[in-house]
Amino acid sequence: MRFAERFIGWVFGIISNNWYPVLINGQPFDFFKSTRGVKQGDPLSPTLFILAAEALSRGLNALHLNLYFCGFVLPNSSPNINHLTYADDTIIFSSSDTTSLRLIMEFLAKYEATSG
């Protein structure tokens, strides 16, 4: 997915400019800067989650294009399925051969490095 530099700048500005107050015994004490994430209740949060979930889903679907990947086997009339996602839970289906599991783990490592 490619995004315009302006959009990336907006998102980065929202994520990197979070300051939180600290209360000690009910009295304001100091602020600290958040280094990652969006504020709770931020309207941008669901959008960013959906973008990241879509990247995960497309990457898992792309595994079927790899000749060495052996997915979960269903009857011939059924669609290929390799994952189910609901809210923030994902179930990944695969055969148990070493190559397929290694390909899944490599993709998840790349996704983790990209998404932070």
Image: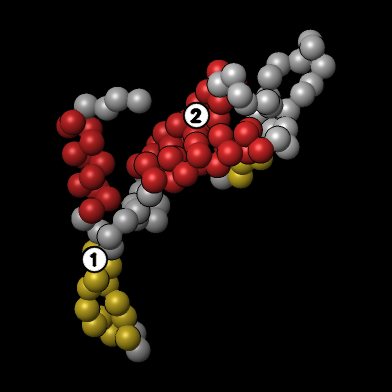
Query: How many C-alpha atoms fall within 10 Å of the one at disc 1: few (<14), some, or many (≥20)?
Result: few
Front in this rendered view, residue 39 or 74? 74
> At x 50% / y 36%, what residue is drawn?
107
- The residue type indicated by label 1 comes to Lys
Q: SS at mark 2?
A: helix
Q: Would you name the residue on which mark 2 appears? A: 59
Q: Nearer the viewer, residue 87 or 23?
A: 87
Question: Can residue 45 be seen in the rendering of this structure?
Answer: no
* Residue 84 percent location from the top left of the image: 65, 33
The residue tagged with tag 1: helix, strand or loop?
strand
Residue 24 left/right relative to 99 = left
Q: Nearer the viewer, residue 84 or 108?
A: 108
Q: Is residue 29 above or below residue 106?
A: below
The tag on residue 33 is 1
Q: How is the image coloured?
A: secondary structure
Up-down relation of residue 54 to residue 29 (above or below): above
Q: Furthest residue to the bottom?
A: 25
Q: Is residue 33 left or right of residue 50?
A: left
Residue at 32%, 86% in the rendered image: 24
Q: Determine the residue positioned at 23% across, 32% down.
A: 7
Residue 68 visible in the snapshot:
yes
Q: Quadrant of residue 88?
A: top right
Closest to the observer: 109 or 60?
Answer: 109
Q: Residue type at mark 2?
A: Gly
| CA–CA distance in space, label 1 to label 2 | 33 Å
Q: Is residue 70 above or below residue 78?
A: below
- What residue lies at 23% left-to-right and 66% top-to-bottom? 33
